[in-house]
DNA sequence: GCCTACATGTAACGTGTTACATGATTAC
DNA sequence: GTAATCATGTAACACGTTACATGTAGGC
């Protein structure tokens, strides 16, 4: 089956940005990629080690003044190749995203209507907050990086987040209506 | 952190339907719940065992003629309670759905435009097929179970799938436009 | 002295998939 | 006889999170 290890490619990708250390990668994840990818230190450091072992990157110990020592990672030519290879490979199976909201709703006939409505209503509020967050990030990108062509792809992913979240909010609204 | 084991509740939920055996549950998953939940035998059987141990269900060996023996599971009162309890509990952390499409796109400036467009275009085709599948299922439900109130909640989840898929298709279209 | 941010790392655990093993029965 | 469907189950592995351990440096 040879499933590709996406985490490895996420890190390879981050090495093409200004991210040099595991710590920086975690920060980048938690901001820019947060709405579609997540990663913990428990994965980052072992994966970085593995990437070096495979010759896809090199490490360099660097002392900073005023800050602890860091390990800086740099993509090798082989690493760049590996990344491009992954980028141009077609999507494998579209993984089924597990959706807890729908799982609960599916069995909600065992609950009274008011509770179900409350449940969806609560979810709707979460979605509205999320939408605001996306819009804030979008504005920040547009203000700070007018010149950066890199931001273009970032905006694509944000646009996705916004569109899907809006569709979800509308679904919440329609479903509540149907329940009443 | 006491994270709830969703798989256990999925099975508890299935036991409120006509599903009595692990085999039936797998089939049900692969049809009705397929677009938002998935489960393998490697999870189903051990979880059923655990559910019985916890006193949430009982087992019964049944011989069928013309077919192999089966183990039929029935929810206990405690099991029903546990399910209702879960249904009325609020959503914990909204888990970040890992999105391979967005991950690739995020790093796509290292690829030529034509390839990126091809990639999104391919994804769009998958989505269109998916949408057709949803619509077919929807029609089947409406034809076969006009009387069944149970179908109502199933249709809610399908409506979700349709709306989100449509929004995704539109995003593909818009993104391809922007890339050109 | 203590808190925060920076920085790296591992061990234990939980979850989930895949591949394999086993066997009944029916239809061809 | 052999393929397909029905039916149950486990062991090995892959993946990911959490909690913990360790240490530097700056600001209060």
Image (cartoon, coloured by chain):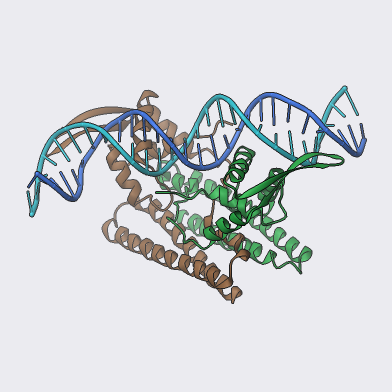
Chain colours: A green, B brown, C cyan, D blue
Q: Is residue A74 left or right of residue B54?
A: right
User: Where does residue A102 sit, x and y in percent of width and height?
Assistant: 46, 49
Whether residue B11 is visible: yes
Outermost bottom residue: B180
List x then y, in percent, for residue D13.
44, 37
Q: Quadrant of residue A142?
A: bottom right
Residue C11 lies in quadrant: top right
Residue B87 location, x and y as percent? 47, 39
Q: Residue at x 71, y 46 (%)?
A: A21
Q: Residue at x 64, y 49 (%)?
A: A57
Numbered label tally? 0
**Near-viewer residue (A11 or B15):** A11
| Left or right: residue B95 compared with residue B38 | right
Nearest to the observer: residue A12 or residue C27: A12
In the rendered image of this protein, does residue C4 appear above or below residue A75?
A: above
Report x, y in % for residue A34. 64, 51
Residue B18 appearing in the image = no
Residue drawn at 57 percent across, 75 percent down:
B177
């Amino acid at each position: 089956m040879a499933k590709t290890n996406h985490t490895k490619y996420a890190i390879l990708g981050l090495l093409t940005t200004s991210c040099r250390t595991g710590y920086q990668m975690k920060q980048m994840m938690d901001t820019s990629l947060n709405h579609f990818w997540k990663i913990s230190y428990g994965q980052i450091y072992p994966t970085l080690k593995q990437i070096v072992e495979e010759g896809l990157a090199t490490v360099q110990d660097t002392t900073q003044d005023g800050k602890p020592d860091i390990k800086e990672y740099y993509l090798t030519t082989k690493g760049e190749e590996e990344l491009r290879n992954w980028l141009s490979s077609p999507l494998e199976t579209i993984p089924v995203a597990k959706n807890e909201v729908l799982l609960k709703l599916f069995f909600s006939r065992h609950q009274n209507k008011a509770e179900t409505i409350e449940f969806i209503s609560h979810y709707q509020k979460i979605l509205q907050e999320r939408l605001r967050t996306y819009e804030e990030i979008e504005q920040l990108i547009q203000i700070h990086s007018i010149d950066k062509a890199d931001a273009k792809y970032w905006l694509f992913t944000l646009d996705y987040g916004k569109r899907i979240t809006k569709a979800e909010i509308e679904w919440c609204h329609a479903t509540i209506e149907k329940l009443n």
